[in-house]
Amino acid sequence: MAIDTKLPKCATWFYVHQFIPERAVTSNLISPLMLLAFRLMCSLYATASVIENLTAIKGLFFAYFTNLSYCGLAGYFWVKFIISLVAKVSLVFSWTAN
């Protein structure tokens, strides 16, 4: 019995059948190096804001959902920066190896 690999009709509504993973991690507006620098600036700013709020509010920092969300946002930007950095470094080394 063959397995049906056809996508459902709703997948074409959202263009899931045309998904290209490489385009999901790049930008059409700015270069990858500028995107790397932007992510670094955002992650540094978010981390500095979290540290400043931790020292200002002291015991009530985790009592507010906004602060928890900002911690998550800072973590997201750090992870995206590290992933972009690793991708950029591996791309540079793959070009120099040839």
Image (tube, rainbow, N blue to C red):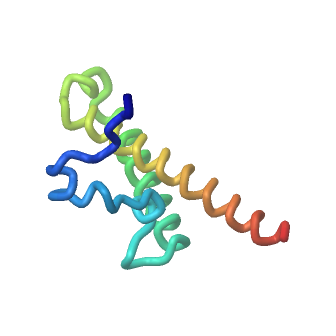
Point 42% across, 50% down: residue: 77
Q: Which residue appears farthest toward the front when viewing the image?
A: 1
**Which image quadrant for residue 62?**
top left
**In this view of the protein, which residue sits in the foreground, 9 or 3?**
3
Q: Quadrant of residue 93?
A: bottom right
Quarter of the N terminus within the rendering = top left
Residue at 44 percent of width and 60 percent of height: 25
Residue 45 position (above or below residue 94): above
Of 95 and 79, nearer the camera is 95
Q: Which quadrant of the rendered structure holds the C terminus?
A: bottom right
In the image, what residue occupies the spot 48% across and 47% down?
78
Q: Is residue 75 left or right of residue 61?
A: right
Please give the name of the residue rendered at 33% of the width and 62% of the height, measured from the top-left corner: 18
Of residues 53 and 82, the one drawn nearer to the viewer in this rendering:
82
x then y, percent, for residue 35: 46, 68
Q: Count the marks: how many? A: 0
Q: Is residue 87 above or below residue 35?
A: above
- Seen in the image, is 53 located left or right of residue 98? left
Image position, residue 95 (x, y; %): 76, 71
Residue 91 higher or lower than 53, as above or below:
below
Q: Position of residue 85 (x, y in %)?
A: 60, 57
- Observer-nearest of 61 and 76: 76
Residue 13: % across, % down: 15, 58
